[in-house]
């Protein structure tokens, strides 16, 4: 079996030590890891157990999923790369099947497995084992590196969440496709890669809402009325949840307000201005 044409790229951020066992599935591949929480103890544990890791970088700055994965992909030397997360379990045999899918389907850029608990396909032809799909889960996919880079990789303006949705949109607008191999199954725990605390909760909530606005503005799907209405809605919810002692929901509402404000500061003002002048020109 040929292993040297596949690299495995994995991001860590406050990763639980329990997920180390999943790395054993990648022992025959070149592994590239970036830990964005500067966990030297975890690094020592992993390097002791897996001495053949090709690259293991650590940083005390969290640059997000899109930027981190792009950084690792650029370091790989192989034709294909498997993008996966610490809490995802996929066998070596399954990875090789995904590679075979890419080789069979000449118009493919990404191949994905079925993921337990995540419906990323609708296959009306039950006898088809390999078929095109419109979306992926960033937790695990195999990609042709050259084609992935020609698509300009992940948009690094997305910190966390929506970068995989945006990538799928770029693929949809190109002449390439994503293929699902239904004979391959992976398990993804979901938010199991990161130790849960208030900081990670805030990071998730802020960047989900920010990513939603960025994605919709990028593809002209955002409405000005939404930008004007939602801050008021979340402010009212914040007040209500605060006075009813619903702490988590109050924090979530505050995160949404912050995310919208961040979007407006970065790109929303220009969006509103352009929309205003477009309407004026039409009238």
Image (cartoon, helix red, strand yellow):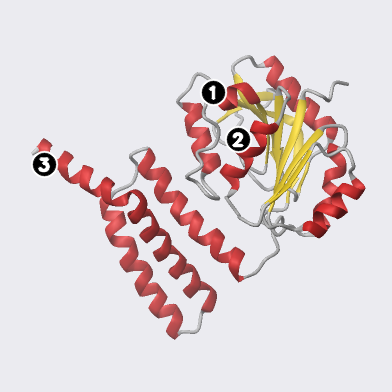
Quarter placement of the N terminus = top right
Q: Which mark is residue 236?
A: none
> 278 or 105: nearer the eye?
278
Vertical comparison of 257 with 272: above or below: below
Near mark 1 (Cα within 10 A), the count class, few <14, some 14-19 or many ≥20, is: few
Q: Earlier in the sequence, mark 1 or mark 2?
A: 2
| Position of residue 14 in the picture relative to residue 211 (left or right) | right
Circle 1/circle 2 CB separation < 8 Å: no
Circle 2/circle 3 CB separation < 8 Å: no
For residue 203, which quarter of the picture? bottom right
Mark whose residue sits in front, 1 or 2: 1
Q: Earlier in the sequence, mark 1 or mark 3?
A: 1
Q: Which residue is mark 2?
A: 121
Give the x, y percent position of residue 102. 69, 21
Mark whose residue sits in front, 2 or 3: 3
Q: Which residue is mark 3?
A: 280
| Position of residue 100 in the picture relative to residue 248 (left or right) | right
Give the alpha-carbon distance from disc 2 to disc 3, as whole Å.
42 Å
Give the alpha-carbon distance from disc 1 to disc 2, as whole Å.
25 Å
Q: Which residue is mark 1?
A: 150
For residue 248, which quarter of the picture? bottom right
Give the x, y percent position of residue 189. 72, 53
Give the x, y percent position of residue 145. 64, 25
């Amino acid at each position: 079996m040929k292993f040297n044409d596949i690299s495995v790229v994995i991001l860590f951020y406050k990763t639980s030590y329990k997920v180390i066992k999943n790395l054993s599935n990648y022992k025959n591949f070149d592994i590239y890891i970036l830990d964005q929480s500067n966990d030297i103890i975890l690094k020592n544990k992993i390097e002791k157990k897996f001495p053949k890791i090709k690259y293991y970088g650590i940083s005390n700055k969290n640059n997000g999923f899109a930027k981190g994965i792009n950084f690792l992909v650029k370091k790989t030397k192989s034709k294909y790369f498997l993008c996966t997360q610490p809490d995802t379990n996929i066998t070596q045999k399954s990875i090789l099947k995904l590679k075979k899918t890419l080789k069979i389907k000449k118009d493919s850029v990404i191949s994905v497995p079925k993921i337990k608990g995540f419906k990323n396909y609708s296959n009306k032809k039950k006898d088809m084992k390999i078929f095109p799909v419109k979306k992926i889960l960033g937790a695990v996919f195999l990609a042709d590196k050259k084609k992935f880079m020609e698509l300009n990789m992940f948009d690094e303006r997305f910190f966390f969440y929506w970068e995989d949705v945006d990538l799928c949109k770029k693929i949809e607008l190109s002449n390439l496709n994503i293929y699902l191999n239904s004979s391959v199954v992976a398990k993804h725990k979901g938010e199991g890669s990161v130790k849960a605390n208030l900081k990670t909760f805030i990071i998730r909530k802020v960047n989900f809402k920010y990513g939603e606005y960025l994605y919709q503005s990028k593809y002209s799907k955002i409405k000005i009325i939404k930008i004007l209405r939602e801050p008021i809605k979340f402010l009212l919810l914040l007040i209500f949840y605060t006075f009813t002692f619903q702490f988590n929901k109050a924090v979530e509402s505050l995160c949404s307000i912050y995310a919208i404000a961040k979007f407006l500061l970065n790109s929303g003002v220009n969006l509103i201005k352009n929309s205003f002048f477009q309407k004026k020109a039409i009238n």
